[in-house]
Image: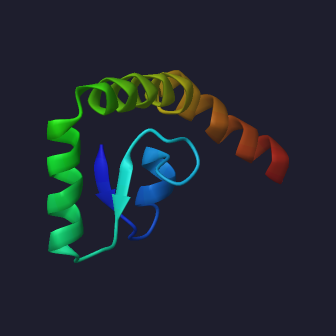
Amino acid sequence: VIGSDSGAIPGVIGGFTGGAGLVTPEGDVEALTAALRRVRAEPGLRAALGAKGRARVLALFTHAEVAAATVAVYREML
């Protein structure tokens, strides 16, 4: 995944902490182009980011994981 540093996007893709994607400055066309070219040119990077991204989705963003996190928030509020 390649995303911008806008809002929650870096946290969702793990660009700053999980390494599951590349983060570029919002609105920076040159940085986005460079990131796209880098991913295209580096098969090992593509494979690593793909594997990390899949693992991140399975750990944090399945229906079951989102439901469990929601329940945990509600329990904490009670």
Side (left or right) of 59 relative to 53: right
Query: Does residue 25 appear to the left or right of 61 in the view shown?
Result: left
What's the coloring here?
rainbow
Kindly identify the residue that appears in the image at 33 percent across and 72 percent down.
Answer: 25
Q: Residue at x 37, y 32 (%)?
A: 49
**Viewport quadrant of the N terminus:** top left
Identified at 16% across, 71% down, the residue is: 30
Residue at image location 40% in from the left, 24% down from the top: 54
Q: Position of residue 44 (x, y in %)?
A: 31, 26
Residue 32: percent from left, percent from top: 20, 62
| Quarter assignment of residue 26 | bottom left
Q: Is residue 78 above or below residue 41?
A: below
Q: Quadrant of residue 59?
A: top right
Q: Is residue 64 left or right of residue 46?
A: right
* Residue 9 at x, y percent in the picture: 41, 58
**Which of the pair 16/43 is nearer the observer?**
43
Residue 17 against residue 66 in the figure, above or below? below
The spot of residue 14 in percent (x, y) is 50, 46
Q: Quadrant of residue 69?
A: top right
* Labels in figure, total: 0
